[in-house]
Amino acid sequence: MTTAATRRAKRPAPGLNAPRLSGAGLRGPGPRGWFIGAAFSIILWAGPTWNQVWSVEGPLTWKAAASGSLVAFFGAYAVLPMFCREGGVRAGLACIGVLGALNAIVIYLVGIEALWTWPFLACAIAMMPLPSRVDYVLIGVLAVASLATQLLTGNQDQAFFQPALIVSLGLMMCSFARSIRKTVQLRAAQTKLAEAAVAAERSRVARDMHDILGHSLTVIAVKAELAARMIETASGTDPASAKASGADPSAFEDSAPLRRAAAEIAAVQDLARGALADVRATVAGYRGVNVLAELAVARTALESAGITADLPATVDAVPARHRELFGWVLREGVTNVVRHSGAKQCRVRLTASEVSVEDDGVGPGPAGSFGNGLTGIRERVMAAGGNVCVGKSDLGGFRLAAEV
């Protein structure tokens, strides 16, 4: 079934698979770039391959089945690398399994000429979220299988060219994919550092507001109260009290300005106290515990203590209404790990409704032997309508979990 069209199909398409990953999901400029590159590759490679089906004689049912298998394989090739890229190793292996099954169907229906879909398969493997050694092994197996198949079928002119193409494209895409993932991780780290810097600056501003403005307002309120007492002492008793005691009321006719001054001083005192209350409320909002800031502090504290930290990469799953409470739980749990556990590893998990801190240390103490910190956490969580669970961790140490 070797035709001129087939030979043209065997030429590698320039610019094959040039993804630019960024963002998440199937939307955004990164996936859009992958889809455009995949579309050009499919046009250059699938056209001649399609001719292998429709330019030869054969049953219409076979042509329809072969065409459908090609469409399914190329569609999966274009979508699955982007769909699985953030799903972990299991998702990557599952997507490779789907692509392999579809490719096997194509080869079964079209014939040995369809082996030229394997460079696509190598590039898809490289773009999956797999460890580097797994990528290398799979691409190597694919190249060896191509070499053996071409030699066994007597296709000597392609026996070394096709495996070389599979290895070169696959390794190039592996390197490119790792570079892109590192760039995405760097951007995420920059975002986290920026958020932590903002949180630190907010804390500094709140501390300065409390120390400077709060102190000044407190002094104003105290001095206003003192001035009011001095005016009261200077003016003596009011005329009504003087008349009741038999004193001369005329001695107090000039006390009206003093009484007015006392009223103004009292108003200043009230304003100062109200402003002080507002400052404290504002500072409390700025200095409130936040799970994102606590996560950054936890990472630093654990690393300083020589404890391996297994922490979530993001807190996006935690609703805003739970972030302060989860921050308190995280702070208490990590503090206990650092101070009392003797652990070598600490694991933190965050979901929309639960936060847990686990370690591989000495484990829980006697029943009911909880310090003030855990007692306070229990009270906070129960006040929010949740439950606290303490006990032995899967890692062998202590586990603190709060669910709301």
Image: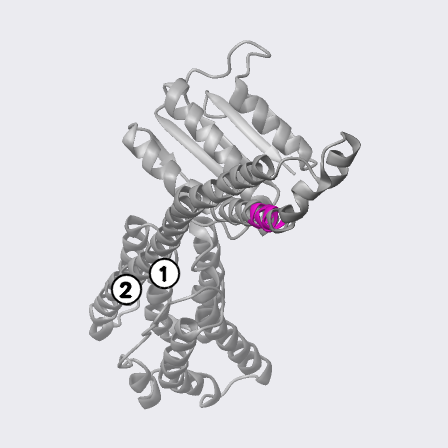
Residue with the mark numbered 1: 125
Tell me, yes or no, whether the highlighted magenta stretch contains residue 353.
Answer: no
Magenta highlight range: 261-271
The residue at the point 24 percent across, 66 percent down is 172
Left or right: 15, with 47 as reference point:
left
In this view, 151 is above or below 1: above
Query: Helix or strand or loop: what does disc 2 sit on?
Result: helix
The residue at the point 29 percent across, 84 percent down is 7
Quarter of the rendering occupied by the C terminus: top right
Of 302 and 399, the residue lying toward us: 302
Residue 393 visible in the snapshot: no
Of 102 and 365, the residue lying toward us: 365
Residue with the mark numbered 2: 170
Residues under numbered marks 2 and 1 in contact, where contact means CB atoms less than 8 Å apart: yes
In this view, 220 is above or below 151: above
The amino acid pointed to by label 2 is Gly
Residue 186 visible in the snapshot: yes
Cα distance between the residues tagged 2 and 1: 8 Å
Closer to the N terminus: mark 2 or mark 1? 1
The amino acid pointed to by label 1 is Ile
Q: Quadrant of residue 140?
A: bottom left
Left or right: 98, with 42 as reference point:
right
Left or right: 169, with 69 as reference point:
left
Tell me, yes or no, whether the highlighted magenta stretch contains residue 267.
Answer: yes
Residue 259 in percent (x, y) is at: 64, 47
Q: Residues within 10 Å of mark 2 (few under 14, many from 20)?
A: many
Residue 257 in percent (x, y) is at: 61, 51
In this view, 109 is above or below 104: below
Quarter of the rendering occupied by the N terminus: bottom left
